[in-house]
Amino acid sequence: MEKTVEQYQKAAEQGDAEAQYHLGYCYEYGKGIAKDETQAVYWYKKAAEQGDADAQLDLGMCYNNGTGIAKDEVQAVYWYKKAAGQGNVNAQALLGSCYEYGIGIAKDEAQAVYWYKKAAGQGDADAQYDLAVCYYSGKGVVKDEAQAVFWYKKAADQGHADAQYNLSLCHNNVVEEEEEELEKEERKVWIKCNSCGESYFVGNKEDWQKNGLTYECSKCGGKISVHFFGLCNECEEYVGFVYPDFADGVINFAKLAVESFSNPLNAFKSLVDNIPSGNYGICPFCRNAYIQCPNCGVPIKNKADAEALSEIYTCPNCHIRTR
């Protein structure tokens, strides 16, 4: 190795850029010669000024780290640009990082992505990872999770640990989203005919959104008007609140309440007696309706649970008990 250093020394002194770079490298790391970072910078600069891309990269790193020369991030970027412009993959990746975080140059995430792409395209695993992060977060580029996964995989295939971890998270998120979507699609919508008491489901949530809110009972042929749907917290199925027969009842409730105002207890008893029993109920005071899920039996009140005590229900809004 010492003989090689001597050869580099002679060639470097004669102006050979490649020899100057190698001599600088030997000085920086003490290869075949006493380590001397100042001399390393001296020979890197000689080669860099002649256009040697490797020397430009290493000189930039010396400026960035303060190795053998005063730390100067602006000068570091200057030499990274020189090397990156010649296609040096490491310089391209480092320049992208400088643009991303505003090191030695004004922060510019779009430029960061530009240089990450250059380096990633040449197979640099760190640049592939950084590019994936940009795509995933929408930093300097339009958010694109498919592209993020693509570049995570490129880096992961080269053994990049962070890319492997993030790739696994992406796959888990996709699986969870697909499972959640499938679960939603498989949820049944239950409705019950007030006329004959038949309970059945009419499809999934998407079906009733498309088909509207009016159904025909499959047993008696009666029209069923669904006023709204609630999600049962117990079995997570959608239940239609169907009470077409309640319209006249509500009016009667109001009349009874007015006529019997002087005797609230009798009024309440009359109102309760007029409420259809079974799976439907409506509070005579606050008029909140409830329905019992035909699937699990849990009573639901307009997007909220109602308390059930045998066949007696407590209105979750005004706490009046009724059957």
Image (tube, rainbow, N blue to C red):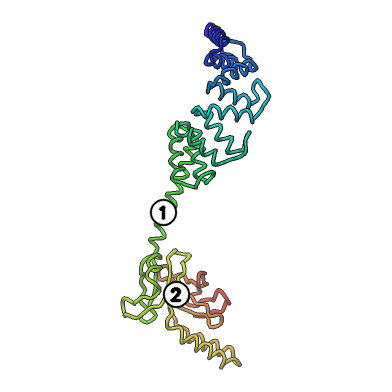
Q: Residue at x 54, y 16 (%)?
A: 17
- For badge 1, the amino acid type reads Glu
**Distance from label 1 to label 2 (Cα)?**
28 Å
Picture quadrant where residue 204 is located: bottom left
Instruction: Identify the residue shown where x is 37% and y is 82%.
Output: 195
Residue placed most toward the observer, 141 or 35: 141
Q: Nearer the viewer, residue 278 or 230?
A: 230
Pointer 1 local density, CA inside 10 Å: few below 14, some 14–19, many at least 20: few
- Residue 222 can be seen in this image: yes
State the residue in front, 141 or 273: 141
User: In the rendered structure, are the residues bearing label 1 and label 2 in contact, judged by CB atoms less than 8 Å apart?
Assistant: no
The residue drawn where x is 55% and y is 17% is 21
Q: Position of residue 101 (x, y in %)?
A: 60, 38
N-terminal label among 1 and 2: 1
Residue 194, given in percent of the width and then of the height, sits at 39, 80
- Would residue 180 appear left or right of 56 to someone viewing this image? left
User: What element does badge 1 sit on?
Assistant: helix
- For mark 2, what is the residue? 241
- Amino acid at pointer 2: Phe
Q: Badge 1 is on which residue? A: 179
Q: Of 230 and 25, which appears nearest the observer?
A: 25
Secondary element under disc 2, as helix, strand or loop, is strand
Point out residue 323 in the picture as x, y percentages from the top left corner: 49, 80
Residue at screen point 55% across, 86% down: 268
